[in-house]
Amino acid sequence: MLFSTGQPQSIADVLQDKDKRVAFQQMLLKKYPTAALLVVKLNIPGEIKYNNSIDHLFTVGYNELKKSLFKNKFFLADEFVWRHPAGETAFIVVNSNGNDLKLLSVNFEETYKLGRLFDVDVLTRKGTISRKQLNLPVRRCLICERPAKECARSRRHTLDDLKQTIESKWYTFQQITENSDYRDKIIDLAQKSLLYEVTVNPKPGLVDPHNHDSHPDMDIFTFIDSSLSLRPYFCSCFDAGWNFAKKDLQELFKEIRPLGVAAEKKMFTATNGVNTHKGAIFSLGIVVTATAYVYHQNNNDDVDNILKIVRDMCHDLVENDFKNLRQLPVENLTAGQKQYLDFGLTGIRGEVQQGFPTIVKWGLPYLNKVSLNQDLNQRLLNVLLQLALHTVDSNLIKRANYSKETINKAHQLINEYFEFGAEKTASGRSTFNQILAYFKQKNLSLGGTADLLIVTIFFGLLTDLL
Amino acid sequence: MEIKKTALAGTLESSDIQILITKGTKGIEIELESDVKKQFGDQICQAISETLKGFGISQAKIKAVDKGALDCVIKARTIAAIQRATNASEELDWRAI
């Protein structure tokens, strides 16, 4: 509670402090005769004027005010902060005629979310600059719309009502700050996941910082451009999940689909028409949306909960997406659509609809199993290969020209790599080189698996496995 | 009690009142300046004159500049001014409130 601790102040204490403050202000104005003095206090009724929580509130608001001083290029000549039991006061000497400073402080009082809790006075040698002098409206009461002075004088509101209003303003503010910190965190994680994935090297059949033989039309820079272009998309996904209030989560999926289409367009603009992250836009967008939804509903980001929401959002995804495929001209079909028609493979849609079983069964447990001390690049490279072994990658199938033999050979090599003890043994390392060579020779790619790695990285970062 | 010299107490800060006491001959005269004079002028003057009476002062000129002070502040500032004007000790006599 904001007012539960602290040293109660009598009227004499408060008035004595006020006298000291006025004397100090006079001294500062004498020392800096051409400057203006900004005096910042909290507007706190009652006997408790100072404690840790009140100091926190004061400091947050005071820093915000100073930020806006710097932003408006005011020069601060001197600064003092008093932390007295009768309340905190900050004195800032500013090079200003005072009027522009008063406008700034009124703007702070009126528009900043905690501004109503502060009194920001501007003094010069000629006296205190009033709102009236600058034709600004009088200050309104904390609770009602009447002029503040009227309510104060008539004691229209009880002390408890005033305290409660102040506390609720402060708690709402803290909540909003926390929520926006969480939003920033999740969107950072989404972008980080994209950038981590492309950085892992050497990856068979994928773009990494050293090699992009498998995809001559793109390189690491294309991926950086693409990853940055997707930030607004992840923001919109987060907000859609956060604000979703209906019951049927499939509606939430319908809400974000057009966002994904728009994000693809942005990606193509950023990459000059190259498809870098189409799959990630789909799967990571859904995951970010579900994460925001779960956090807003339950105040946690438990992976099981998030995946349950993913399943609910995409309940009929495969059936809906593929139901009219046979009516489309064959040349318009994507690899995933074709493979569904020809082999009944559900690809990334199936994976998402079931709540990323490959990641749950193979990706995350593998991350959990290997020690945190191990080289991050090697861990993620191994996760990629684990995922490749256990998923049906539509991109691999397409690049293998639907040859079962080619796909089996690739899987067999990856299997051997792990059986030989992976990067820890000479035969493991030599098998890895064979994998790279085979992918290069057959021009294979693991595009679908890379998308799963991205989502695995996201959950790994979210749960501190990385 | 008698006013011996001119004395000042209080500030022009918000929620405060500045009280200037000088000798008077026509009973208690109060000149008030306040943003809320219309609504609360009588109450403010009453708080000042009651405090003066509490100290047995019947002759004084008061100039008060109010910045939205509450009654308890008005009384405290008036007492401080009286103490200074009557050469009483700096220790305030809070029993008068």
Image (cartoon, coloured by chain):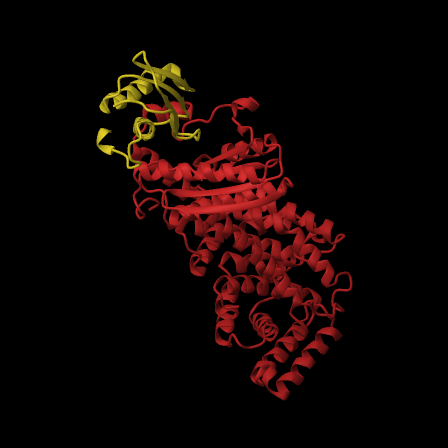
Question: Is A402 rendered above or below residue A122?
Answer: below
User: In the image shown, does B74 or A290 lie closer to the viewer?
Assistant: B74
Position of A5 with respect to A283 (left or right) is left
Where is residue A35? Give x, y as percent. 60, 37
Rendered yellow, the chain in question is B
Report the side of A32 relative to A398 (left or right). left
Q: Quadrant of residue A89?
A: top left
* Quadrant of the snapshot with the C terminus of chain B: top left
Question: Which tint is chain A?
Answer: red
Seen at 57% across and 81% down, the residue is A418
Name the outermost residue toward the bottom.
A426
> Where, by quadrant of the figure, is residue A403 drawn?
bottom right
For the N terminus of chain B, the quadrant is top left
Residue B50 screen position, x and y as percent: 25, 21
Picture residue at 49% right of the left edge, 59% below the top? A354
Residue depicted at x 30% and y 26%: B71
Q: Position of residue A36 (x, y in %)?
A: 58, 35
